[in-house]
Image (spheres, grey):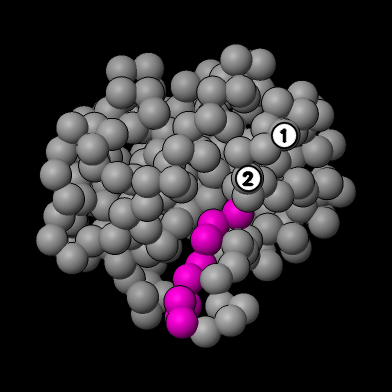
Amino acid sequence: MKIAIIERLENYKEDEPFNKRYIIDESYKEIFDQLNALVIPVISENNLEEIANICDALILPGSAVGVDPKYYKDVPFPGKEYNYDEYKLDKKVIDLFVKRNKPILGICGGLQTLNVYFGGDLNQNILNHKLIDGSMHKVKIAPNSFLSEVYNQEEIEVNSYHRQAIRKLAPNFDIIAVSEDGIIEAIGDKNIIGVQWHPEILRDMKFFTKFVNKFLG
């Protein structure tokens, strides 16, 4: 099993050497080691066709920067950081995996990217969801959804590290989880799933095992 994952650019100090780097969180390594999956990092627009051909699924992880709002005909929120090139790469990779009908999982910023890609838009500044102290909050799960299959319950607690969220939902998606304050926390469409929280940080093996077994089994 081969899974493509887009690495995110981390730019700590531009004026110092070795500080501009592409990364993925170590949690992905731990999770996919347990699932005996080969993770293939994506950092370039080169050879994307080959990656889409050989990989069985795509993961769009979270990002420190937001989707450039010009992609959904909005203007930047003051003080926010956006990255044109990051979404440009995401879009090309999504194109190829959708064309091949291969599963896609979007996490946090990855969910936001999927929603914009399919025609939705974003609220660029929401309150009370960047819980940097490790706090958890509740989300309600839609019945007969992917998440209901994972957890077999109506409500779960999740972490939260985001300041943006879905405003207008892309027309192809169903809402499969909502927070107590009405924020869309998860979406689904056939073999595409997006969650606003970070199951990888929680080391949520139930979630990742179900994704693999349901869509790649």
Magenta highlight range: 7-15
Q: Residue at x 51, y 67 (%)?
A: 10
Residue 170: x and y in percent read 31, 24
- Amino acid type of the residue that numbered disc 2 sits on in the rendered structure: Ser
Q: Which SS class for mark 2?
A: loop
Residue 49: x and y in percent read 70, 26
Q: Residue at x 31, y 18 (%)?
A: 171
Q: Give how far apart the Cα atoms at labels 1 and 2 are.
A: 8 Å
Horizontal arrangement in the rendering, residue 164 relative to residue 113 (left or right): left
Instruction: Look at mark 1 in the image and give the residue it sits on.
Output: 47
Q: As drawn, which residue projects farthest toward the bottom?
A: 16
Determine if residue 33 is in view.
yes
In the rendered image, which quarter is residue 150 located in?
A: top right
Q: Which SS class for mark 1?
A: loop
Vertically, is 195 above or below 71?
below
In the rendered image, which quarter is residue 127 located in?
A: bottom left
Instruction: Look at mark 2 in the image and give the residue it sits on.
Output: 44
Res. 122 mark: none
Residue 194: x and y in percent read 46, 38
Image quarter in which the C terminus is found: top right
> Dot 1: within a 10 Å radius of its alpha carbon, few (fewer than 14), some, or many (20 or more) residues?
few
Q: Is residue 206 magenta?
A: no
Q: Is residue 12 magenta?
A: yes
In the rendered image, which quarter is residue 56 located in?
A: top right
> Dot 2: within a 10 Å radius of its alpha carbon, few (fewer than 14), some, or many (20 or more) residues?
few
Mark 1–mark 2 contact, CB under 8 Å? yes
Residue 103: x and y in percent read 63, 27
